[in-house]
Image (cartoon, helix red, strand yellow):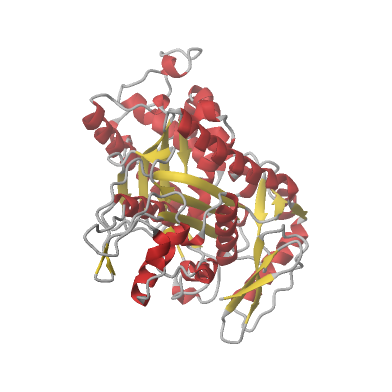
């Protein structure tokens, strides 16, 4: 909180008096205070300077969320036929039903603009109320200029240029770290009493070949502040970082959106990171609570999901670890499956790799079927219809979990979450949905807004495989063209969506907001 210095002869608690003082430096320091409706703000004044006292922050977490998906998609079953692969390879083998598609009108910046604009508007948050803005992405359109700097278009008109944070980059992990940084800022002595805003935005596209069906796109914005209904177990974060070339985008590849992917190494790296993080999380949990952590004790288990089948395989591997640790027996997970005749080899040396053969996977999937249906599958609603959202993937899963339950059932829940980004960076952590009527009301509001956003999945425009291929070819050309005017029509975009107007000869990008009456153009 900021305090009034009672020793100053002009000291009063009236903000209007303070803001009318002639000192321009004072006005600049206090410009954001006028719109702080949700904070108890007072001011210390001494010799025309402003010095905030330390602010005590408690229950820091997520106060609001908004998600955005592109308004075009292609059906995976139709892609199977067009690609000449066996029926069910994408739908059953990967667990994907649809895939979001971005035209040349949308990119990571436009989606970030859209999702932040919608969050501020729908949750009635003034731009001045944001003190930190951080973006997680791996889909930058510039190797120097941050996506966050493009988002400043939404804040400078209100006079808010005092805004900490930039982009965080490490494949799909950037969104998680951006959120962690926002939480840490509010909890720190650097906090000035305003909200923080974490954004995850990405376009996942692949060159023609077996990986193309695992694309997608989306963006998530999360408002961070005190007395939040969604809080983090700060002492229960387990990180695993390593140097790996499982998925990367070398600058030597030139102007292309396509990554270099070692699919087999990427899956192995994901599972090794999962094992390392879960093992460390369990050790920290036992030290903190004096009891063993078990995956079955969490109300939901959410994963970074490049494709939905990977999340299912990740869950059974956590069950495998629990069985190896002897903290749970098969009959506790599925009473219909006997403890005898288990076709799985429980060796400690397998805990690091989590390498299972097909028979072992099949048995563990049957054993964990109920656990998957209740703890993980509800969070994959968007993932199976949108595809890989890179940085936004895990946080869209959280949004789906919240949107799919009533607030009275959400309160009191503890969620286990695993974030992974190739290269690699990973973390396992837990989230608590706080009890109490006030938190229930907040969760109800968040869930309602997210359910409305999820309903937009039913209003998208379906592309044929041929139209999808044409769209991808257009994006390929656009990636290396300047000047460039997008060719996609605006009809497929919903209202309150930002889109790319053009790229000039100096590669400067201009965006506009599609609204019902007229377009408001913003230059980047």
Establish if 419 lies above or below 102. above
Residue 315 is at least partly visible in this image: yes
205 relative to 417, above or below:
below
Q: Position of residue 9 (x, y in %)?
A: 25, 64
Q: Residue furthest front?
A: 9
Residue 203 image-quadrant placement: bottom right
Work out whether residue 302 or residue 264 is closer to the camera in this orientation and state it: 302
Q: Is residue 487 above or below residue 235?
A: below
Say whether residue 40 is left or right of residue 219: left
Q: Position of residue 273 (x, y in %)?
A: 36, 45
In which quadrant of the rendered image does the C terminus lie? bottom right
**Residue 187 x/y as whole percent:** 30, 49
- 465 and 15: which one is in front? 15
Q: Is residue 433 left or right of residue 72?
A: left
**Res 134 visible:** no
Please report the residue visible at 43 percent of the width from the left and 62 percent of the height from the top.
16
Which of 225/248 is in front?
225
């Amino acid at each position: 909180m900021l305090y009034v210095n009672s020793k100053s002869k002009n000291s009063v608690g009236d903000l209007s008096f303070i803001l009318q003082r002639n000192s321009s430096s004072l006005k600049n320091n206090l410009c954001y205070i006028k719109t702080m409706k949700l904070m108890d703000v007072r001011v210390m004044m001494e010799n025309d300077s402003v010095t905030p006292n330390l602010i005590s922050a408690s229950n820091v977490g997520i106060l609001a969320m908004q998600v955005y998906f592109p308004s075009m998609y292609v059906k995976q079953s139709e892609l199977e036929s067009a690609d000449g692969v066996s029926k069910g390879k994408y739908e059953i083998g990967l667990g994907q039903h649809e895939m979001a598609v971005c035209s040349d009108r949308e990119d990571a910046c436009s989606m970030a603009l859209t999702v932040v604009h919608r969050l501020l508007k729908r949750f009635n948050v003034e731009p001045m109320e944001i003190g930190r803005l951080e973006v997680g992405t791996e889909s930058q359109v510039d190797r120097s200029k941050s996506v966050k700097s493009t988002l400043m278009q939404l804040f400078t008109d209100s006079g808010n240029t005092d805004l900490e944070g930039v982009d965080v980059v490490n494949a799909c992990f950037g969104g998680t770290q951006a959120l962690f940084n926002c939480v840490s800022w509010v909890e720190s002595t650097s906090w000035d009493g305003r909200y923080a805003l974490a954004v995850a935005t990405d376009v996942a596209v692949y060159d023609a070949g077996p990986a193309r069906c695992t694309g997608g796109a989306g963006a998530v914005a999360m408002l961070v502040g005190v007395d939040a209904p969604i809080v983090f177990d700060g002492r229960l974060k387990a990180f695993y970082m390593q140097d790996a070339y499982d998925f990367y985008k070398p600058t030597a590849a030139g102007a292309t959106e396509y990554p270099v992917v070692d699919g087999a190494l990427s899956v192995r790296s994901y599972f090794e990171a999962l094992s390392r993080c879960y093992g460390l999380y369990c050790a920290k949990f036992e030290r903190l609570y004096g009891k063993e952590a078990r995956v079955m004790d969490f109300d939901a288990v959410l994963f970074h999901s490049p494709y939905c089948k990977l999340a299912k395989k990740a869950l059974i591997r956590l069950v495998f670890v629990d069985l190896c640790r002897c903290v749970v027996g098969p009959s506790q997970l599925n009473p219909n499956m006997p403890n005898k005749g288990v076709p799985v080899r429980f060796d400690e040396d397998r805990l690091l790799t989590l390498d299972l053969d097909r028979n072992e996977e099949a048995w563990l999937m049957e054993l964990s079927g109920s656990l998957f249906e209740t703890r993980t599958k509800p969070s994959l609603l968007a993932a199976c219809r949108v595809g890989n959202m890179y940085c936004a993937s895990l946080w869209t899963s959280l949004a789906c979990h919240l949107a799919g339950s009533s607030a009275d059932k959400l309160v009191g829940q503890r969620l286990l979450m695993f974030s992974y980004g190739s290269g690699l960076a990973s973390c396992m952590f837990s989230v608590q949905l706080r009890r109490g009527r006030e938190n229930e009301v907040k969760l109800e509001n968040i869930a309602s807004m997210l359910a409305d956003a999820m309903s937009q999945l039913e209003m998208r425009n379906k592309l044929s495989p041929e139209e999808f291929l044409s769209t991808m070819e257009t994006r390929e050309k656009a990636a290396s063209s300047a000047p460039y005017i997008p060719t996609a029509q605006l009809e497929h975009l919903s209202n309150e969506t930002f889109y790319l107007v053009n790229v000039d000869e100096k590669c400067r990008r201009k965006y506009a907001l599609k609204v019902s009456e007229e377009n408001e153009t913003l230059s980047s």
